[in-house]
Image: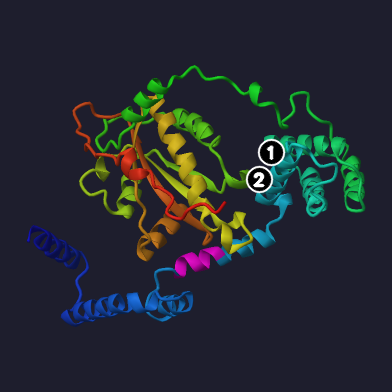
Amino acid sequence: MSDVISRVAHLVKRLARNPVSTSQIVWRIGVRRFQNRLAGPASVSGFTSSLYYTFLSTYFRREQQAVLKGKAAYRRSDIAQQASSSNLRRNIHRLEKGLIMRPRRPVFAEDYIAETVSLFDRASDAGKLDNEEYKWAGDVLSDYFSVVSDSPKIAPARQRFSAIEYQKSSDPSTPYPSDARPQSTITFDEFKTLTAQRRSVRWYRDERVNRADIEACIEIASTAPSACNRQPYSFYIADDPQEATRLAKLAGGTGGFADNIPCLIVIIGDLSCYPEERDRHLIYIDASSASMQLMLALQTKSLSTCSINWPDIESREREMQSALGLEKHERTIMLLAVGVADPDGEIPYSQKKGTNVLLKTRKVPINR
């Protein structure tokens, strides 16, 4: 009963903010009921599902347009104008994987080495590519041509790369032995304590957040794993409390504490990093991995966070797009409130699922 009352109260509040006629309310309720009744029958196949979302629901239109806009932006991208190239990054990472194979093949990457060298050559002439990205690409290409055998496709690529006259750096950005990784002294129990300390905090002290601390933590976040190292995300920092509050309120679900947020980070996914629809979910996977590292890094700086869900609501999408000047192929992944926790502010207990619930047993036996 209380749930019904809560829903009615929520509807009354919405109507107070956005008055509509009785006929409009009846129409909307009728349409929603009709959609809900057809959801089951429409889900029986991919074709009927497509018909449902073509004629009865607009919920995926922004995503469809964003994917197509991303494909178009990918194809017209010009490395001569870019500080970072997702295509070059992908190809260089593929070369790295070929270099570390055991056993390593004498000939590999024939299908894309010409494109890779062409991209690097154009980036070298333009001089717009980020220095570290350019160094990484050049060093890996140097290693590749030092070990690969010639073939009809590799030989001309080798000749073109030689003409660039790239000098491999003294501290190369190339594959290295696993033992050469920095060794952490953090114990399991210490890390467990850090994860327990990182809770979703909604009440903060009235203190400005040091932007240098956020930038240092974003550098840590950038080390998170990313498919083919494309890193299809960016971070928008709103460290003015008024702007942080304004953006936080766009998400919904922030009622009661949005005015208390001193800093907000908006994590944006970039679909122009991919030429195919099959990769459209990578912006969410990669950005989420980076965001989790960002939250943990911020906690080590005594900055608490609260990850804020970003529901797919068209009106809010348009407002965020306008506020940040986003392209159609850029999609909001999530928001992150940041600040120094108010020691008296309470935190929900938020019981977490146990291992016995999260671990699943294979239902289909393995064929031997």
Helix, strand or loop for disc 2 = loop
Q: Secondary structure at mark 1?
A: helix
Region rendered in magenta:
61-67
Quarter of the image containing the N terminus?
bottom left
Q: Position of residue 254 (x, y in %)?
A: 26, 48
Q: Which residue is mark 1?
A: 133
Q: Nearer the viewer, residue 55 or 38?
A: 38
**Residue 350 screen position, x and y as percent:** 24, 40
* Mark 2 residue type: Ser
Residue 214's disc number? none
The residue type indicated by label 1 comes to Glu
- The numbered disc on residue 84 is 2
Residue at 80% x, 39% y: name it. Answer: 141
Above/below status of 192 relative to 54? above
Whether residue 177 is in magenta: the answer is no
Residue 326 visible (yes or no): no
Q: Residue furthest left?
A: 1
> Is tag 1's residue or tag 2's residue first in the polypeptide sequence?
2
Q: Residue 170 lies in what quarter of the image?
A: top right
* Dots 1, 2 in contact, CB < 8 A: yes
> Residue at the location (84% across, 31% down)?
167
Count all numbered tags in the image, as a single digit: 2
- Does the magenta stretch mainly form a helix, a strand or a loop? helix
Q: Dot 1: few (<14), some (14–19), or many (≥20) neighbours within 10 Å?
A: some
Looking at the image, which residue is at 47% across and 28% down? 212
Q: Is residue 30 left or right of residue 234?
A: left
| 316 w.r.t. 248: above or below | below
Horizontal side, residue 300 vs residue 143: left or right: left
